[in-house]
Image (cartoon, rainbow, N blue to C red):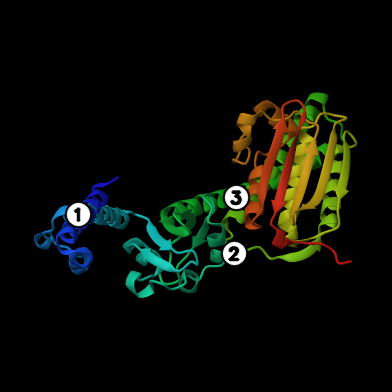
Amino acid sequence: MNTTWISLLLRLALIALFSATVGSWQGAVAGWATGCLGLLVLLFSHTLQLSRLQHWLKRPVSQTVPDAWGAWGNIFIEIYRLLRQEAKARERILADLEIFSQAAEASPDGLVILDADDHIVWCNRIAEQHLGLRGERDAGLLVTNLIRLPRLAELLSGACEGQSLLYRPIERKGMVLSIEAIRFGKNRKLLISFDVTQIERADTIRRDFVANVSHELRTPLTVIAGFIEHILEEPVPAAAETQHQLGIMNEQVSRMLRLVDDLLTLSRLESEAQAPQEEEFDVRDLIYDVSAEARRLSGGRHSITCEVVPAFLKGSRDELHSAFSNLVSNAVRYTPESGRILLHWEVKEGKGVFSVEDSGIGIAEEHIPRLTERFYRVDRGRSRESGGTGLGLSIVKHVLLRHQASLEIASVPGAGSTFSAVFPAWRVTLPQG
């Protein structure tokens, strides 16, 4: 039992004892009257203390802590102690908030805090410069109404790490920003803008260099290839050794031409900022075309089959033909003779999935994350024998990125590999009826 109850019980006991004493001297009526008067005095005392507490709580400063005896004095002291703790905690929070605000302002990246409905709560100075916002003016406004960027609403609805959009502000010509969104706290989002202008500029210079060199190489290589073909087709028999050397030259020139063509394709895909020209087409026709090409490349050395469900796919048919063809040609090149290759198309949970499954040599797990890098080779010797350029999966990756799709790779060394292109549901349409 706490001291407040003990104090109250003692006072009631004193009133009862005093009333009984008066009653024994002056009679029962005087005793009851004395008891009632004592209770009224006690009630008035508590009411007075409550009134003083209410008045003090309106402006609780240390200099005006009410003086009170007994339990009320303890109550005033305890409340004052709690208020002081709360004030100190508030000061610490404000100090931490000030430190956070200074750190956010010092960040080289733009930071915008959004509420659950994507309204602006706060933004730093860099975000104002990057995105054309004004913190005080735009607080409470919907961010998608202020930043005109396709698919920004989709990015915010997902708000996952690793997803980003490129943004080129109209009012700041030449600037390129990368924008990401991350969830934090309770239904809050952090929109981050990174200045990637220099990176994009360097990448543009690199792409232009590759494209220019490739164009310059293609003409002399075409001429050399033409002369070699002409010599090989001459009716005059050449020495066996010369014929063999010319065959090797023709093979290497053809390989260089394929490499130049892939470099030009990759350079074009990287340099095109605009979305691809899209159409809706029957995905079965595309897969059957790719499988026919694969059979020609295989020359009957593999079993190539298709499992395709009816569906329409929205995108650039030419670009997707290039991506699918690269996946299938890789399977042909890296699958031993008499191996099996399956081209599979299905719709899972609304998403379209094109898979190329082979019974080839497989890939060790440590190589899989790097397979889409340019010229990355798991086995350089075997890659040269297969005639690949080392750019096929890079082309696949860029085509899929332009179609908001992803590449998934599963492989077991010695048992084969499965390469899957997964397309978002809004790009897939099932036939009616």
Q: Which mark is residue 216?
A: 3
Query: From the viewer's perspective, is residue 385 above or below residue 59?
Result: above
Task: Left or right? Give the position of 104 relative to 66.
Answer: right
Q: Give the position of the N terminus as an image quadrant.
A: top left
Q: CA distance from mark 2 to mark 3?
A: 26 Å
Q: Give the position of the C terminus as an image quadrant.
A: bottom right
Mark 2 vs 1, N-terminal side: 1
Q: CA distance from mark 3 to mark 1?
A: 116 Å
The answer to whether any part of residue 259 appears in the image is no
Mark 2 vs 3, N-terminal side: 3
Residue kind at label 1, given as amino acid type: Leu
* Residue bearing mark 2: 274
Q: CA distance from mark 2 to mark 1?
A: 96 Å
Query: From the viewer's perspective, is residue 51 above or below residue 239?
Result: below
The answer to whether any part of residue 365 appears in the image is yes
Mark closer to the observer (2, 1): 1
Where does residue 262 sit, x and y in percent of width and height? 66, 47
* Residue bearing mark 1: 17
**Crowding near the residue tagged with mark 2, few <14, some 14–19, many ≥20 C-alpha atoms within 10 Å:** few
Residue kind at label 2, given as amino acid type: Gln
- Name which quarter of the figure residue 413 lies in: top right
Q: Secondary structure at mark 1?
A: helix
